[in-house]
Each structure stands twice: as structure tokens, then as C-alpha cells.
């Protein structure tokens, strides 16, 4: 019979690649309560270990992998793990979430987190089981793509995470593959490459995870599942068409990036929509496990079974390059998957190169609207060949050397995802303040503003409040750690929201935002967490505590970034979004960032330079040692 | 008799005064032009400086072909292409840049495009230099920081192109054109001008003309800096500082770029903190490094910074050191208005990268180690920041 873990094991496996040894440490009980798990816990583990100012590609960088408390309990969409490190793309902290099987394998090997120190002399991979870690020579798989490497590693366990050639060649936005899912952003794969670490495989299936209060957990979980299955997004459009269900919505709302963010919609967008792809490629589900939303899909493309590119890939390697052929976009996606490269940063950097070539800053045949040379460029980037070497450092570094900073579409060095904030001002603020750089998942304001029409996309009033609120919630959900897409069900299904007409919600949000936000019922998430760890859940107070844990993780990450030199000067947007109107707008619109930023800092408890005040840190208990 | 060989180019004619704008039509006529395109910063247009400029053209026989007002703080090729397109469409024959460094650089870049009948600067980025005189170019700085852009460098899209053809033909500093600035902006402009003047005096090319320009700049700054820092919004006080900026940038255009400026610019690239902040903090360290290497600082420094009386009262062997002290004092009075550049908080790999990039820049005569030594020194207390009685200044 399998051994059991009740709630969480709180055991951390720490490995030193240089010395090829491991040791075990514990997550303090206090930290579990303050930081929940996943992202929050990852940040805390890193904060306690990482020296500020180190080179992210040097031996002193540390990679932390953490699991959520719900993983292994059978809660829907809970099979996700988090990685936290210092990003070689942005030079600040980066956190990433992935739904691949590695997380489950590590957790059911008995570990709640894994911390990787040092740099191996030679390429290695690490095998983990409940007894600890062993180190194996990876020379035979060094230089292989992610699919082949993963297959090799899976001979040693039930879940693996690997890098491809991009990570090995230190492309600054290399990612990590686990199953058919990716730890996408900020070059977490590059950090593995810099440590000569090709992959990690965990044996898994050694422990059974059981919630401490099974009865309460089952009750909450049933409600959770019902919400997911009732919601028209989670059980409707996303289940049928995946994230690409957003393409037509974004196009109609004028937030679809087209030709390096020079337009917000395009007449051919329908060709790359989820609806079109579902019909054309006869799609089936291909998802993280366990999942009840089922947003991932695979289909038959060019006679092969392929994963359907997600919304961000379709926009950044498609519409933003002026390409509207889903088969071609899928080709690019497959290449990036094989080399292990973030599709958002790859697309954003190529779009910069196209515009730079058009304007005579660099010599290149890349042109908007033409797929010629793109596949070769992706390969060149992965192997750092020719012009690819320059693009492998991302659009920020390329534009610092070759110019075109005004159209390098990144925030803090991380390329922007597929939503143009000139069509949703709150999204603009959340891009600017997102801790890891150009990230849509920090607050996902487009959901509130453009998709569900719950706030006027161009109004400024209350936007800083909404952004802060969403950031805290999303940070807490990522700490829980469960898929962010469950937010549609958790937020929209409670009766108060479900039966209130949208125009009233919009009116409340826009005029009485504080009240409206406080009426939101997100209690399902904290209820689940309390049931798993066996703590008493007090309605309302439990939810406030959950928000506060999210706020704590967010401010801790900000504080760690401040130690790396981040300040107000970095909380900004690409010049194009601040200065230039778009071809699709009736009247030129730009993001009025400054007016929102000041209020946001005040709400967050930062000073006018964006630095958390002592009082704020104290209030959140950041920096205190817990037992 | 000893003969002194030197080269000095001071192409721009400097017009300075309360109503110097009205001289522009005459200057244009002298350059066979009568329909300039004005490249203006958004701030200048918002403050209605464009209108003042138009009024100065009243009944002069010249007309303004158009005002291109999209310029903000970044000089990029996109704007230069738009400006060149407008220039052609309106049939203009000269450029007036109204604003700061970015406006001047956009005007220079657009000028190359129209003068060479091309739509790309790529050959120039690859090392080509203009083969002929460009269209007449008049620069009207609207803040004293911009005045430092009167030299022979075109800085566009983070690339530096150098040519004598990039000098403006005329620089006009007019009191009506100076935008009210903050104490920090005032300090930064003074620091940039002082840095230009200082390093052109230290440069090994000892051209007396260049030194005369640098001395005049330092004198203007010395006489006006404290008043300007107290009342930075006062246009009357801004004018001499702007003029010093112009003179210093012409002097600097005839010298090698100084280590502090280059390092400051590279650190700005790495950290997004303005170069002036680093310059203010690194200058004392750089001067100390020079002395430590036993390369004497020119005695002229004291003459320029403290005047004839102080110069005459100091024994010859102490001139360099006392000159450096006087200059550092000037830098420190400006540096009080800007934040400290906590160099110790910048990640070491970024500092190393900035040093390498600085050492690989064109025309510099220092290595990455020298740059690193300056940074190291900046973290320590320098002996000459201490009075003889041991008290910190
Ligand atoms: S909804 Fe999509 S991303 Fe979330 S867990 Fe399910 S398959 Fe994965």
C-alpha cells in the first residue's frame, strides 16, 4: 500500500549540482500560513537563499520548484507547479507556472519543493525519488530537442522537465518542457542551461496525498466542480476552442496585437480563431492533469498530431507578425517547442526585428506579412547563429544595441503578450506594475475590461484599485496553486454575480469599486486550502487572509526586485503605447499611465519612487524569520 | 620660437540674447534657405514656443514649412523618417530643431535622409559618413540640458555617429525659448556642461581654442550656477548655463570623450538611471585615479574653475590638485540636487558589462580596467574630499 501524506509534507529537497549532493530542509509552519505554497512559497524560499546582485547566469543563481497544496488531492486544475528564479531576460525575479506531469511526480515522491544550487561541471540530469536525488551524465542527450530529451528521462520516472537547445545555448527566453506544457517565460530554461542541467525526472506515485479534512474538502470540491461545469467560459467556449476562443473577442475589442502593436484588430483575424481551428484541425482535448476546464487541444495539422498553439502564441507568432495562416503559426510553435523557447518572447523579438529591418536599423529580409525566413530565424536564435545571436538576448537588449527602443515591445525586458493595452487601460497599468515584466497573468485586467465588459476599458477611475485587487488574488491563486483559469468559475458563478446584470456590475465597478470588489466571493479557493492543511476556515476572515497572502507574495517579489535596482523608472510601458495612436482607432488613444501609477503606489504602500515602505513590509511580515 | 600645431572646428555660429530668434531669417538667407521645417519637442509646442518662433519670422520673407511636433525624449529612426517625409512633402529647405537633445538628433537624422535622398540610415550606421554638406540646420535649445547637444555627434537609436557635418550651422539661445526647469534638471545640465568642459581641458590635444571654449563655459557656470540652482525656473539665469552648455559641447567635440561621460552613458544603458547622476558621482573618483597614476592634471583647471586670482596664489606643483578640488566643489554643489548613484547596489555583472562597453567605444583612450578602477574608487572615500584638518567637506 502507498504511504500517505496528510495535507503537505513540508519537505524541501535541496541539491547542489557542483558537489553532486543533496540535503533536506523543512518549510517552517509559519511560512506555510503566510505564503500558502506555490508561488508565494517559492519566493520565500528564494528570498531566504539568494544574494541580491548576482549574475542570473552565474553559479550563484538558484532555481526553486514548488508545488501547491491542492496538487494530488484530486481538486480540478490543481496539477500545476511553480518555478522561481532570477531571470536572465529581465535581471529580476521571475515566477512561472506549468501544468505538466513533473509537478505531480515530484509531489508524490514526497517533496513539496526542490531547490537547485550551483553549476555542474558537465551536463547532468537529476533523478528524484522519495530517498533524495541522484545525478546522471547527460552528455548523451545534450544537444537534443525537448521531446527526445523528455522521452529519455521518462525511463527513470513518471514526470520530467527538460530544456532544449535554446536553454543549452543560453537564449535568454528559453523555457522548460514537461509533458506537452511549458514553463514559458523569463528564461527559466536558460537558468537550467547555465547550470548544465538538462532535466529533472521524478519517480512519483510513491505517496498518496490526502486532505487533512477530507469531508470538508469533498464538499468544497464538489461546489468547485459544479461552478466550473456551469460557467459558460470554463465549460463552454474555452472547453470547446481553448484560449483561442479569445481571438475574435480581442479583435472586436481592438486589443489584438497586429504588426508589432501598430493596430488592434485585423480583417483576417477569424482565420486564426479557435472556432476556425477547431473545425479545420478536428481538435481533441490535450490538457494538464487533473483538469475540468480542458482548455488545451490537439489536432491534425499537416497530417501530424500536434498541440494547437495557444492564444499568446497565435497572436505573437501570428497576427503580430502579420501572419494569419494557422498552419504556418503551428509550424513556428512546433519549432519553439522543440528548441524550448518562449513563443511570446520569440514572436515579440522577431516583430521588433521586422520593424527594425523595415526602418533600416538592421539588415534582414524579415518582413511583416511574410513567413519567409521566420522558421530559419527561430532556428538561428535557438543555436545563436548569425543574427539569431543578437535576437537571442530579447528585444530589450537588441534595441539597446541597434536602436528601435521606441518599438521594442517589452516591460522590464520581458516581451508583451497578446493584449494591446491601448484598448484596455487597466491592462496597461498591470503590465507596468507586473513584477516579472510584460505579463498578462499578473492581473488579467482585459478579462474585466474587454471580455466581460465589467469595467469601462478606457476609464481611469478605480483602475488602480482593480489592478491591485486582481494582482493580490492572482498571486494568492498561484500560491494555492491552482490554474488561474478557474477564476472565471470562482468569480462569476456565485449567485450574487451570476444573477446581476452586467451593466449593473459595470456601474458598481466603475463608481463604487471598493464596495464591488469587497462583494466578490472568492471563498472557494481558501476553503479548499484550509481543508487540505486541516485548518479551521472562518468565512470572510479566511478569504481576507487569502487575499493578504497574495498581497504578501506580491510585495515580497517587489521587494526582491527593488534589491536588484528596480524602481519607478522601470514601471513603465513601451514608448509606442504611451505616445502613438493606432491605425484602428477612430481617435488616437495612448495609455495614460502616470495618472494611474501614483494612486497604485499609494494603495500598495509604496513610496513615490515605487519602493515598499518599511511600514508596509512590517504589516505584511516580510523579512521576518518564521518558525 | 615654438610653434603649436592644433586643429579646432567650431562650425556653429552662436546667437545669444533676449531677442536672438529674430536673427534666424537672416541666418537662413545667408545659407540660401527660406522655408524651414521645425522639429519641435511636444513640450515646447505645449508651452506655445512654436508660436513665439513663428512670430519671430513675421514679415521676414521666410516662412515656416511645417512643425513636426512628435518628439519626446527618445530619438528614434521612426520619427526621423516621418520628419523627412514631411520635409519633402512641404518642399522645405532647412531644419530648425526646437527642443532638447532628441529634437536636435531627429533633425540631424532627417537632414541626412533628405540631403542624401535616401530612406535609410543603414549605411551610416555601418560607418559611412555624409559625403556632402547637409541642409542648413539651426538649433534652438529650449532647456539647458539640450544645449549639450550642439556638438558633432548624432545620437539616434542608441547609436553614436560622428561627423563635422552634424554640427548645427547656428545655435540660438533666446531667453523666451527656455522652458522652466526643476532644480534637478538644472543640476543635470550644469553637470553635463561641466563634464564636457573638464574633459576637453584634460584631453591630450592641447588646442588653445578648445581650452578657451572650455574655460569660458566653466566661468559662465561658476558665475551663475548657485543662482540658477536656487531659481531654476528663472529663464534669465538659465540662459548663461545654456550658453555654457553650447560652448562646452563645441570644446568636447574637439576632444576625446572623457572616461566619466562614456562610463556614465553605458551605466545609464544598463540601469536606466540618467548618465548625469553617475557623472556627478564618478568625477571625483576619476580625477583621483588620474593623479594616482601620476599623470598630472593640467594647472589650467584651476584657472578655469576658480579664476585668475586663485590661480596666481597657488604654487605651480599644486595647481593640478587644487584645480581638481575647485572643480569637484562645483560638481558637488550641483550633485546636491540629484540622487546619489548607489554604485554598490548595481549588480557586479552589470558594472563589468558597462566597463567593457565603455572601453570598446570609438575614440576612447582607456581600457575596461581603468573604468573599473574608477568605479572601485567611487565606492571609497577619496583623500581630497578631506580638508587638511581631516574634516569632510
Ligand atoms: S484549464 Fe487549461 S491550463 Fe488550466 S489546468 Fe486545465 S488544461 Fe491546464
Image: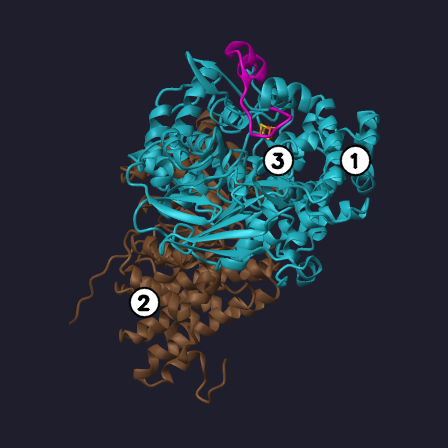
Chain colours: A cyan, B brown
- The residue indicated by pointer 1 is A509
Camera sees residue B52: no
Residue stretch rendered in magenta on the structure: A270-294
Q: Is disc 1 in contact with disc 3, using a CB cutoff of under 8 Å? A: no
Q: Is residue B165 above or below residue A552?
A: above
Marked residue chain, label 3: A
Report crowding for label 3: few under 14, some 14 to 19, many 20 or more residues within 10 A (C-alpha): many
Q: Is residue A285 magenta?
A: yes
Q: Is disc 2 in contact with disc 1, using a CB cutoff of under 8 Å? A: no
Q: Secondary structure at mark 3?
A: loop
Label of residue A78 in the image: 3
Report crowding for label 2: few under 14, some 14 to 19, many 20 or more residues within 10 A (C-alpha): many
Gap in angstroms between the C-alphas marked 2 and 1: 63 Å
- What residue appears at the point 51 percent right and 42 percent down from the top-left corner? A106
Do marks 1 and 3 share a chain? yes
Q: Which label lies toward us, 1 or 3?
A: 3
Report the front residue among A576 and B12: A576
Q: Which label lies toward us, 2 or 3?
A: 3
Marked residue chain, label 1: A
Q: Which label lies toward us, 2 or 1?
A: 1
Report the front residue among B342 and A498: A498
The part of the image, by quadrant, that contains residue B186 is: bottom right
Q: Is residue B150 above or below residue A494?
A: below
Report crowding for label 1: few under 14, some 14 to 19, many 20 or more residues within 10 A (C-alpha): many
- The residue indicated by pointer 2 is B202
Location of residue A87 in the rendering, given as x and y in whole percent from the top left corner: 47, 47
A232 left or right of A205 in image: right
- What residue appears at the point 48 percent right and 66 percent down from the top-left corner? B221
Amino acid at each position: 500500500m502507498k504511504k500517505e501524506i496528510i495535507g503537505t509534507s513540508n519537505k524541501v529537497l535541496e541539491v547542489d549540482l557542483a558537489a553532486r549532493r543533496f540535503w533536506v530542509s523543512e518549510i517552517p509552519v509559519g511560512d506555510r500560513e503566510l505564503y500558502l505554497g506555490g508561488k508565494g512559497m517559492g519566493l520565500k524560499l528564494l528570498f531566504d537563499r539568494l544574494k541580491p546582485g548576482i549574475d542570473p547566469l552565474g553559479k550563484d543563481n538558484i532555481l526553486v520548484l514548488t508545488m501547491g497544496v491542492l496538487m494530488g488531492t484530486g481538486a480540478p486544475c490543481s496539477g500545476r507547479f511553480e518555478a522561481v528564479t532570477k531571470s536572465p531576460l529581465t535581471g529580476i525575479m521571475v515566477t512561472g507556472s506549468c501544468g505538466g506531469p513533473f509537478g505531480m511526480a515530484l509531489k508524490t515522491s514526497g517533496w513539496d519543493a526542490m531547490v537547485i544550487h550551483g553549476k555542474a561541471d558537465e551536463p547532468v540530469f537529476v533523478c528524484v525519488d522519495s530517498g533524495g536525488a541522484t545525478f546522471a551524465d547527460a552528455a548523451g542527450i545534450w544537444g537534443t530537442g525537448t521531446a527526445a530529451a523528455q522521452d529519455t528521462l521518462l525511463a527513470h520516472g513518471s514526470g520530467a522537465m527538460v530544456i532544449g537547445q535554446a536553454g543549452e545555448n543560453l537564449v535568454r527566453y528559453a523555457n522548460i518542457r514537461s509533458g506537452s506544457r511549458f514553463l514559458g517565460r523569463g528564461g527559466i530554461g536558460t537558468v537550467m542551461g547555465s547550470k548544465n542541467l538538462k532535466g529533472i525526472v521524478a519517480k512519483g506515485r510513491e505517496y498518496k496525498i490526502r486532505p487533512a479534512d477530507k469531508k470538508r474538502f469533498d464538499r468544497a470540491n464538489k461546489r468547485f466542480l459544479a461552478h466550473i461545469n456551469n460557467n459558460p467560459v470554463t465549460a463552454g467556449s474555452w472547453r470547446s476552442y481553448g484560449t483561442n476562443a479569445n481571438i475574435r473577442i480581442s479583435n472586436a475589442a481592438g486589443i489584438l496585437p497586429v504588426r508589432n502593436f501598430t493596430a488592434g484588430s485585423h480583417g483576417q483575424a477569424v482565420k486564426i480563431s479557435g472556432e476556425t481551428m477547431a473545425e479545420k484541425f478536428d481538435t481533441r482535448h490535450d490538457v494538464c492533469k487533473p483538469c475540468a476546464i480542458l482548455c488545451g487541444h490537439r489536432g491534425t495539422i499537416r497530417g501530424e498530431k500536434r498541440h494547437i498553439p495557444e492564444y499568446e502564441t497565435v497572436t505573437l507568432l501570428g497576427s503580430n507578425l502579420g501572419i494569419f495562416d494557422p498552419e504556418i503559426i503551428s509550424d513556428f510553435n512546433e519549432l519553439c517547442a522543440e528548441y524550448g523557447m518562449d513563443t511570446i518572447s520569440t514572436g515579440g523579438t522577431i516583430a521588433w526585428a521586422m520593424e527594425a529591418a523595415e526602418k533600416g536599423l538592421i539588415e534582414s529580409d524579415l518582413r511583416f506579412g511574410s513567413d519567409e525566413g521566420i522558421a530559419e530565424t527561430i532556428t538561428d536564435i535557438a543555436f545563436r547563429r548569425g543574427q539569431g545571436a543578437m535576437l537571442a538576448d530579447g528585444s530589450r537588449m537588441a534595441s539597446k544595441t541597434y536602436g528601435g527602443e521606441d518599438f521594442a515591445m517589452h516591460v522590464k525586458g520581458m516581451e508583451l503578450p497578446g493584449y494591446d493595452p491601448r484598448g484596455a487601460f487597466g491592462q496597461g497599468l498591470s503590465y507596468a506594475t507586473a513584477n516579472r515584466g510584460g505579463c498578462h497573468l499578473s492581473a488579467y485586467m482585459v478579462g474585466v475590461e474587454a471580455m466581460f465588459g465589467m469595467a469601462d476599458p478606457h476609464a481611469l477611475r478605480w483602475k488602480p484599485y482593480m489592478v491591485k485587487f486582481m494582482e493580490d488574488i492572482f498571486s494568492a491563486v498561484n500560491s494555492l496553486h491552482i490554474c488561474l483559469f478557474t477564476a472565471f468559475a470562482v468569480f462569476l458563478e456565485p449567485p450574487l454575480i451570476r444573477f446581476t446584470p452586467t451593466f449593473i456590475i459595470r456601474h458598481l465597478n466603475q463608481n463604487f469599486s471598493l464596495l464591488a470588489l469587497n462583494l466578490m466571493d472568492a471563498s472557494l479557493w481558501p476553503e479548499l486550502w484550509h481543508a487540505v492543511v486541516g485548518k479551521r476556515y472562518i468565512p470572510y476572515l479566511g478569504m481576507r487572509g487569502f487575499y493578504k497572502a497574495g498581497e504578501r507574495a506580491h510585495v515580497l517579489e517587489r521587494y526582491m526586485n527593488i534589491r536588484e535596482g528596480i524602481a519607478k523608472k522601470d514601471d513603465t510601458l513601451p514608448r509606442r503605447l504611451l505616445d502613438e495612436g493606432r491605425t484602428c482607432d477612430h481617435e488616437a488613444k495612448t495609455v495614460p499611465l502616470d495618472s494611474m501609477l501614483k494612486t497604485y503606489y499609494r494603495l500598495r504602500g509604496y513610496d513615490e519612487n515605487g519602493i515598499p515602505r518599511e511600514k508596509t513590509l512590517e504589516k505584511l511580515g516580510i523579512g521576518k524569520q518564521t518558525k | 620660437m615654438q610653434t603649436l600645431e592644433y586643429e579646432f572646428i567650431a562650425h556653429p555660429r552662436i546667437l545669444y540674447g533676449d531677442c536672438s530668434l529674430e536673427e534666424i531669417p537672416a541666418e537662413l538667407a545667408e545659407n540660401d534657405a527660406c522655408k524651414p521645417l521645425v522639429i519641435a519637442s511636444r513640450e515646447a509646442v505645449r508651452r506655445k514656443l512654436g508660436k513665439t518662433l513663428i512670430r519671430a519670422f513675421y514679415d521676414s520673407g521666410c516662412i515656416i514649412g511645417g512643425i513636426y511636433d512628435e518628439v519626446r525624449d527618445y530619438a528614434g529612426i521612426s520619427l526621423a523618417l516621418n520628419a523627412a517625409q514631411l520635409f519633402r512633402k512641404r518642399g522645405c529647405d532647412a531644419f530648425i530643431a526646437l527642443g532638447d537633445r532628441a529634437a536636435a538628433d531627429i533633425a540631424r537624422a532627417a537632414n541626412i535622409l533628405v540631403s542624401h535622398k535616401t530612406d535609410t540610415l543603414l549605411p551610416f550606421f555601418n560607418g559611412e559618413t555624409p559625403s556632402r554638406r547637409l541642409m542648413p540646420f539651426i538649433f534652438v535649445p529650449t532647456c539647458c540640458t539640450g544645449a549639450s547637444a550642439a556638438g558633432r555627434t548624432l545620437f539616434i537609436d542608441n547609436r553614436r555617429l560622428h561627423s563635422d557635418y552634424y554640427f548645427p550651422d547656428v545655435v540660438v539661445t533666446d531667453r523666451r525659448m527656455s522652458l522652466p526647469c526643476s532644480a534637478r534638471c538644472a543640476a543635470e545640465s550644469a553637470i553635463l556642461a561641466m563634464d564636457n568642459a573638464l574633459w576637453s581641458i584634460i584631453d591630450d590635444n592641447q588646442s588653445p581654442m578648445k581650452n578657451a571654449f572650455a574655460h569660458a563655459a566653466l566661468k559662465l557656470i561658476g558665475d551663475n550656477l548657485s543662482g540658477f540652482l536656487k531659481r531654476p525656473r528663472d529663464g534669465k539665469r538659465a540662459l548663461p548655463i545654456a550658453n555654457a552648455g553650447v560652448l562646452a559641447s563645441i570644446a568636447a567635440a574637439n576632444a576625446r570623450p572623457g572616461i566619466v561621460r562614456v562610463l556614465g552613458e553605458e551605466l545609464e544603458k544598463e540601469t536606466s538611471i540618467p548618465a548625469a547622476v553617475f557623472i556627478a558621482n564618478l568625477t571625483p573618483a576619476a580625477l583621483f585615479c588620474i593623479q594616482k597614476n601620476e599623470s598630472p592634471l593640467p594647472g589650467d583647471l584651476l584657472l578655469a574653475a576658480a579664476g585668475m586670482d586663485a590661480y596666481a596664489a597657488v604654487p605651480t606643483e599644486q595647481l593640478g590638485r587644487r584645480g581638481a578640488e575647485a572643480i569637484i566643489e562645483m560638481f558637488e554643489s550641483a550633485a546636491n540636487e540629484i540622487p546619489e548613484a548607489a554604485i554598490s547596489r548595481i549588480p557586479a555583472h552589470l558594472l563589468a558589462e558597462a566597463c567593457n562597453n565603455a572601453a570598446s567605444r570609438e575614440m576612447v583612450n582607456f581600457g575596461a580596467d581603468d573604468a573599473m578602477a574608477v568605479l572601485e574608487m567611487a565606492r571609497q572615500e577619496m583623500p581630497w574630499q578631506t580638508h587638511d584638518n581631516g574634516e569632510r567637506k
